[in-house]
Amino acid sequence: MTSRVLRMLPTAYLYGLDAATAVVLVMVYLDFARMSDVPPWLGYPLAMLVGAPLALRRKRPLLTLGIVLMAQNVATVTHITLEPYSATAFAMYMVASACSSRVAVGALAATLTSAWAAVLIGEEWPESAGLSVFLALVVCAAWALGRTTRVRRSYEARQAAEAASRAVAEERMRIARELHDVVAHSLSLITVKAGVAAHVAPSRPEQAQEALQVIERTSRGTLVEMRRLLGVLRSEDAEAELAPMPGLADLPELVTRASLAGVTVSLSVSGTLPEGLGLTVYRIVQESVTNVVKHAAPAACEVSIVVGDDAVEVRVVDDGPGERVLAGGGGGHGLIGMRERVAVYDGTFSAGPLAGGGFAVRAEVPLS
């Protein structure tokens, strides 16, 4: 309710400004009518027609211009005033800023033609020539200002549309990265467990059954998370949009899934993080553990997350073969994704084999 009221305030202000201008012009033209020789039954209604319609110029710009122009033409012909069509210029601005180019140009041509005709009828030469030039300058200036406003608004609208398009593209890229992390991690667990099940099925069916249960749980969890990610692309799926993304609180479950695939993970977390940064840390740990599962299982892995005053430090170290990521895919798309996530926050990232064996992933992400 409050946001709606705030959005209405600028519009109410503009309508109030138009109404105030209309009142002022009505009073001015009432004075002109009283000082002229025109009878009140004609002068007073003309004064109302010159000013009052301007209060609604934003809703009916062309109709407002037509009424005001007609009234001012009659006032000029009847010698009520030789005022250079300021009310018409006020209405003309809105026509030029709100209507298409063809309508705006036509309105300008019709206004100048009718106004010049009224001046030529009401005044003698050369007074009519000077007044014609003056009113043309006033009306054309208002028209040019209105067209400039329309062009500026059009440019701003295009800029806003392009910004929205870029935001959509960035969101789709984010979803693609999230899907990569989810699918890569889950498929790694499924592949390992499927291999175990196939190997031990003839001799140890109970282990094969346990592996199949892990595959089932992992598959179901992956489908849920994929639906949540893809749900942001479907406006009708409000529950998916509102579902929370994983964070530090979900790391124990991640560790449990990794242990089912033969990787013993020790987890240490100190401190809390905001939702967006928590998701980044979660994905870094997820991708790092996935690499261990894919290339080093069975192995031991240590995950350490320390939240400091200015930054959060993530460290994932395992004792598996140190060459596995380089041999597995030329550096790995997972490492690229982790590096990009950290770069979003202007953090530092490093990953590589350790001298004594094993592999380490380190990331430091600023909190600000």
Image (cartoon, rainbow, N blue to C red):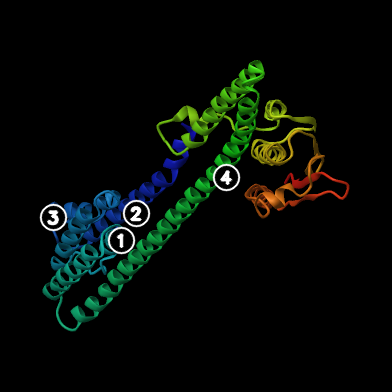
Tell which circle, 3 or 2, labels the residue nearer the N-terminal end: 2
Label 3: which secondary element: helix
Q: Which residue is mark 1?
A: 90
Residue most extreme to the right: 356
Tell which circle, 1 or 2, labels the residue nearer the N-terminal end: 2
Q: Are marks 1 and 2 in contact (CB under 8 Å)?
A: yes
Residue 75 vs 318, above or below: the answer is: below
Q: Position of residue 291 (x, y in %)?
A: 69, 41
Q: Which residue is mark 4?
A: 177
Q: Are marks 3 and 2 in contact (CB under 8 Å)?
A: no
Q: Which residue is mark 3?
A: 42
Q: Quadrant of residue 136?
A: bottom left
Marking on residue 1? none
| Mark nearer the viewer, 3 or 1 | 1
Q: Amino acid at mark 4?
A: Arg
Q: Which residue is mark 2?
A: 21
At 82% from the left and 44% from the top, the residue drawn is: 358
Tell which circle, 3 or 1, labels the residue nearer the N-terminal end: 3
Q: Amino acid at mark 2?
A: Thr
Sort mark 3 into few (<14), some (14-19) or many (20+) by Cα contacts within 10 Å.
few
Label 1: which secondary element: helix
Q: Nearer the viewer, residue 12 or 269?
A: 269
| Mark nearer the viewer, 4 or 1 | 4
Q: Amino acid at mark 3?
A: Leu
Q: Position of residue 2 (x, y in %)?
A: 49, 33
Q: Amino acid at mark 1?
A: Phe
Sort mark 1 into few (<14), some (14-19) or many (20+) by Cα contacts within 10 Å.
many
Q: Quadrant of residue 253?
A: top right
Spatial CA span between label 1 and label 2: 9 Å
| Mark nearer the viewer, 3 or 4 | 4
| Mark nearer the viewer, 1 or 2 | 1
